[in-house]
Amino acid sequence: MNRREFILAGSAMFAAGLSPKLFAASPTATHAQTGVQTQAPLKVLALVFDDYETLDLHGPLEMLGHLPSVEITLIGPQPTVRSYQGPRVVADRLLDAVVECDLLLIPGGMGTRKLVDDTRLLDWLKRQAKVSNKIFSVCTGAALLAKADLLDGVSATTNKMAYSWVTGLNDKVIWQPSARWVDDGRFLTSSGVSAGIDAALFFIAQTYGEAQARKIETLTEYQWNSDADKDPYAVIS
Amino acid sequence: MNRREFILAGSAMFAAGLSPKLFAASPTATHAQTGVQTQAPLKVLALVFDDYETLDLHGPLEMLGHLPSVEITLIGPQPTVRSYQGPRVVADRLLDAVVECDLLLIPGGMGTRKLVDDTRLLDWLKRQAKVSNKIFSVCTGAALLAKADLLDGVSATTNKMAYSWVTGLNDKVIWQPSARWVDDGRFLTSSGVSAGIDAALFFIAQTYGEAQARKIETLTEYQWNSDADKDPYAVIS
C-alpha cells in the first residue's frame, strides 16, 4: 500500500462512518478542551447571510466535511442567501430557531457591515451561543460576535484588512493584531478568509488529533499554515 | 496610505466596477492567450452536481469573484444540488441550456464517479465546450472532460489521490503526474481540491496581469502556491 492508497483507504473508512476516536491522538484531553463528544457525529451549524464571503464559509466546511462523522447545517435569515461573489446557498434552518451544536461557524464578508446593527440577528446570536459548545468565527465574522458582547474579555482576532473597523466595535475584546487564528476557551477566531481553513484544521487537530488533520490536509491537497503565530498579514501599528 | 489602506482602496474601486484593464499588465497579450475580453465582465459558468467537492467549486469562485467585473452563473441537472460535504447550492440554470461564457469551471468530487457514465451530461459538456472560451477543471473534474473526449492530445492533470482512476479513463490525454496545474491552450486543469485556488489565481494573472492576482491573494489573506511545477502531491511511479 503506497501513500496514495493509504489515503484512499482512509477516505473509504471515513465514508463508512467509522468512529473518529480511532484517529484521535488523545480523545479525553481534546474533549475537555473543546466540549466535543468525539464519539458522536460532530454537529456543525453555520450562519449564512447575504454578502457572506464565499471562502469564509466553504473553506472550513471543506475540511470539517471530511471528518469521519459530521452533520453540517446552514442557518440563515431566509431560505436562500447569496454570497458576495454571487452564488446562492440553501439555508437548512431559519433564524427563528436556535440549534444545539458542537461548533457554531460564523463567516464574515461585506454582509457583516449591515448585520452589526441588526438587533434581531444579534439577539439570535446571543441565544444561539448558549447552546453551542464552541464558536468559530472567520474574518469579519468576529465583528458580529464582538457586537453581541460575546467576546468581552476574550482574546480574539479578525481580518487584517478590516482590522480598524472590527476592533473599533468593542474595546472590551483583547484584540490580537498578529495571529493567523486565536483559540481562547470556547472561542476560536481566525484572520481573513483563507485563514479560516487553517483554523478549521487546528480545530480538527485539537479535537481529533493531529493525524486526522494531516489526513484531511493530504486528501484536499492543501498546504496547511499550521502555526497560529505566523501571520503574513499582521497589523503593524 | 499604508498597505492595508491601499488594498481597501483597491477593493472600493473593484466595487465601483472600474475596468480590469486598469490593472492588467498586458491586456492585449493576455486576451490572445485566453480569449477573454478583458474590458467586459468575465462570464464564468460553473457546473454543479450532487456530491461535487465543496472547495473545488468555491475556492476558484472566491478568487474569480474578486475581479473588478465578473458574472458567476451555476448550472446543474436540478434546481438545487448538494455537495459531498452536505450544504446545498442553487443552480441558476439547468442543463437543458448551453451558455456562452469566458470560463467554464468543472469541479470534481465523488459525484464524478457516476457522471463519467452519464451520456446526457457528457453530451451537454461537448456542446457547452464549443461556446466556452476557456475550460478549467479542478480535481476529478478532468475525468468528465477526458470522458467527453475533450482532452484528447491535450496536456492535463488531475487529483493525485485519484490519479490512476482518472488517467485510466482516456489514454489519449497527455497526463502529467507532477503539476499543481497545467495550462494547455483552451484547457486549464488543476490537481486536487486546493490546487484549484492556485490555478484560478494563475488564470487571473494570465488574463489581467500578476498585480491583479496578487491583490486578490492579499484581500483573501491567501498564500498562493504560484509555481505550477511545485507539486507536493506529485505521483511518483
Image (cartoon, coloured by chain):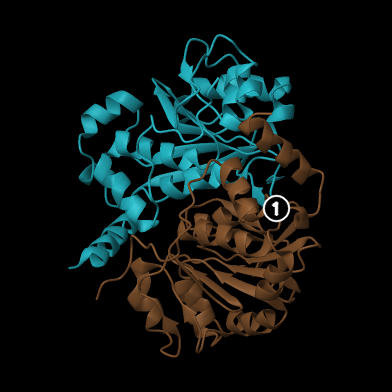
Chain colours: A brown, B cyan
Say if A165 sits above or below B64 in the image. Answer: below
Image quarter where the C terminus of chain A lies is: bottom left
**Secondary element at tag 1:** loop
Say if B90 sits above or below A229 in the image. Answer: above
Q: Position of residue A174 (x, y in %)?
A: 43, 84
Determine the chain carrying the residue at label 1: A
Q: Position of residue A145 (x, y in %)?
A: 54, 79
Could you tell whether A92 is left or right of B203 in the image?
right
The residue wearing badge 1 is A67
Specify the amino acid type for callout 1: Leu
Q: Quadrant of residue B46?
A: top right
Could you tell whether A162 is left or right of A203 in the image?
left
Say if B137 sits above or below A160 in the image. Answer: above
Q: Is residue B110 visible?
A: no
Q: Position of residue B190 (x, y in %)?
A: 49, 31
Say if B232 sits above or below B166 in the image. Answer: below
Residue B10 or A184: which is nearer the viewer? A184
